[in-house]
Amino acid sequence: MAKFAAIHMNPYEEFNRYNKNLSGIKEKETQRLINGQLKEKGVLGEVKSGDGEVGFDWNWPPWKNLPQRYKLIGTTSLAFVVCNMDKVNLSIAIIPMSHQFGWNASVAGLVQSSFFWGYALSQLPGGWLAKIFGGRRVLQFGVLAWSLATALVPLLAGFMPGLIFSRILVGIGEGVSPSAATDMIARSIPVEERSRAVSFVFGGLSVGSVLGLLLAPPLIENYGWESVFYTFGLLGIAWFSAFQFVKEDQTSFSAARLSWLQSDPRNRSLNSSLNEMGDSIKDIPWKEFFKSKAVWAMIYAHFCGSWGHYTCLSWLPTYFSEKLNLDLTEAAWVSVLPPLASIFVTSIASQLADSLISKGVETTVVRKLCQSIAFLSPATCMILSSVDLGLSPWEVVLILTSGLALSSFALSGLYCTHQDMSPEYASVLLGITNTVGAVPGIVGVALTGYLLDSTHSWGMSLFAPSIFFYLTGTIVWLALASSEPETFSKND
């Protein structure tokens, strides 16, 4: 009877059931059409639920599906943007600060140079700490330290020891950051992507210089010199907070392939890292580092490149104003051109280097080529600017800008060699070379001023020493540099 009743259903019930099924089919078909249109526009990602139906999955934010290593590199580059914003802010704010507190040039120079004291002293400890605790932890500490110290400057400006201490702390925070970034790149980025990663991260320094030089003057004019330190300091604190949500890729190539996986700081707790600190310095093969000719090539190349960079960074605005007779506004805007052009050159250099390596060119050959361009280009342009060729001021500006921009090829040369040579000790090696590279910030800038007072010649004081170091650095680099992996094993 039940089967008979089911077959001989009331006509009205049959009609209602047919309509219900038809409506369900139409709803599903309509939903599929809508989903298809949204997917074509890149708004919707197709995700099937448990019953096989298509549902909504909004792909927002756009970087949601990026590989984890790209997110890490992107946020690290942002840290370096903030880094140089906090480095150049004082060079602008020092003018109204000197007027307010009655500082002479010697006191102003003391305040500015105090940054390099902390920067030089923190290089080796930064590399060591990055190896023990991992670059991620060290970078976070560095950004937080220099950002808090930057924000405290307005409160300490009237107390000279406190002000100098705050700038030393900024130098320490920024000093440990290059080694921390190098450690993360060595652990997370394969060699065929390394030039682009290094260039993208350290290229943030050029972006930071541009932004700092452009943003500081209007902030000072409208809100006072204090606003620069508060604003830039808060940017670093905001970065520190956001970086907590960026995770390292636990399945990165280095974690799977490198023999030093067991010592990967990501796999250790903070307590276990602290327990290893006592013996860690003894475990680092310091003597083996300095037995390597390639390490000495990196040390000297870093010194030579830093001499040209720091002396030009400090003295070019004065050169543009006094030698080329540009007014202060023009000199300020012209000073932005080299770091602005460097951003463009960096992208080309990194793409070229990675492309050559991918095509089978030896890594050492690529690094030597890039570093030679980084040294010979500014040396040639400085020679042209030193001799009397009857060039107009703006032609000289163009020549110098081109040379200094091409020096960014070093990011695909010297700055990649630490990771190429030893991913395990890359942060320590960069700490060694960066310590020596910080010396021109202390000695070279002051010596340039002394030579200028003695010779009254910009060619002899600013350009001649840089040309000498660029040329000798090229010779040493071509003769001794190598990207061949080294174990640096201690001899028993």
Image (spheres, rainbow, N blue to C red):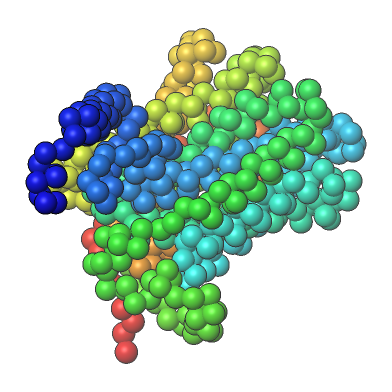
Q: Position of residue 198 (x, y in %)?
A: 38, 47
Determine the residue positioned at 58% across, 30% down.
211
Asked which quadrant contains residue 169, the reply is: bottom right
**Horizontal placement of 241 versus 306: left or right?**
right
Vertical placement of 268 versus 320: above or below? below
Residue 398 placement (x, y as % from top left): 46, 18
| Image-based side of 388 in relation to 11, left or right | right
Residue 222 visible in the shown view = yes
Q: Residue furthest bottom?
A: 492
Residue at figure coordinates x 34%, y 44% from the top left: 66
Quadrant of res 320 = top right
Of the pair 134 and 456, the residue shown nearer to us: 134
For residue 119, say whether it is visible.
Answer: no
- Left or right? Give the position of 475 relative to 333: left
Where, quadrant-wise, is the C terminus in this rendering?
A: bottom left
Using the image, determine if residue 472 lies above or below residue 20.
below
Q: Residue at x 47, y 61 (%)?
A: 135
Q: Looking at the image, is 122 positioned above or below residue 85?
A: below
